[in-house]
Image (cartoon, grey):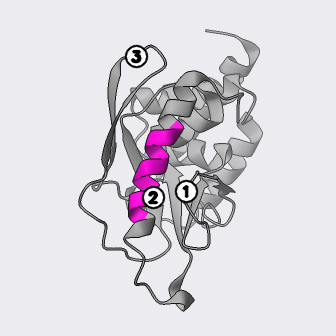
Amino acid sequence: MPPETGAQREYLAALGEIARRIADSLGNVAAQALPVRMYIAGGAALHFHTGERVSRDVDAAFSHRIALPENLEVAYRDADGAARLLYFDRNYNDALALMHEQAYDDAQPLALAGVDPRVLDVRLLSPLDLAVSKLGRFAGHDRDDIAALARHSLIDAASLRQRAEAALAGYVGDTARVENTIDIACRIVDNSRSGSP
């Protein structure tokens, strides 16, 4: 992760509050079902890896089916004092993303103050798996996120191609569009790492 900035501290505190509320809702869960793992993807993961793009929502999947508590939005002030809102996206669905079967096993732990990892183990998708997850939709901000990961030297084209093609092997249907997307993404990575436009 890049050096922590004031903006990132505020964002981290807001994310920590959301995670604490989720962890608190697990108070009556049987010990053998714990910890529940929370895997953060999307713009929130990108922000922690690069310091870029402050996302307003938290995309996350869990290791168990979970009944989420109601209040999962937190108002906070960014480093400039501007009012911000961070909320948990209840509509996020990782089934529609391109995801390697080991993406969650390779996710990186994120320590959050006041969140006991023995209850809620919060993790970030690795930079490589985050980039792969962007290939299914591949909207403008997904392309920008892949470029940001490359600019920060967190991914390279060869590794992205290998991981994405391995992930694609587990999918059914016509994969031609995603195969083309992988080619485009690899060019974006090469251009971003070389400083080309």
Q: Which residue is mark 2?
A: 20
123 on left or right of 159: left
Seen at 65% across and 66% down, the residue is 102
Separation of marks 1 and 2 at Cα, in angstroms: 7 Å
Front-lying residue, 27 or 62: 27
User: Can residue 166 be seen in this snapshot?
Assistant: yes
Is 180 situated above or below 107?
Answer: above
Q: Which residue is mark 3?
A: 81
Q: Tell me which residue sits at (60%, 37%) in the image.
A: 48
- State yes or no: discs 1 and 2 in contact (Cβ < 8 Å): yes
Please state the extent of the stretch shown in magenta in the rendering: 12-22
As for residue 35 lying within the magenta part, the answer is no
Q: Is residue 170 shown left or right of residue 152?
A: left
Q: Quadrant of the C terminus?
A: top right
Question: Few, some or many C-alpha atoms within 10 Å of disc 3 (few <14, some 14-19, many ≥20)?
Answer: few
Of residues 105 and 163, the one drawn nearer to the viewer in this rendering: 105
Q: Residue furthest front?
A: 114
As for residue 21 lying within the magenta part, the answer is: yes
Secondary element at image label 2: helix
Residue 168 x/y as whole percent? 56, 58
Mark 3 in CB contact with mark 1 (< 8 angstroms): no
Q: Quadrant of residue 174?
A: bottom left
**In this rendering, is residue 30 above or below 155?**
below
Q: What's the mark number on residue 65? A: none
Q: Residues within 10 Å of mark 1 (few under 14, many from 20)?
A: few
Upstream in the sequence, badge 1 or badge 2? 2
Is residue 60 in sight in this rendering? no
Residue at image point 26% right, 55% down: 71
> Is the stretch drawn in magenta largely helix, strand or loop?
helix
Residue 101 in the image, given as x and y percentages of width and height: 60, 67
Q: Residue furthest left?
A: 70
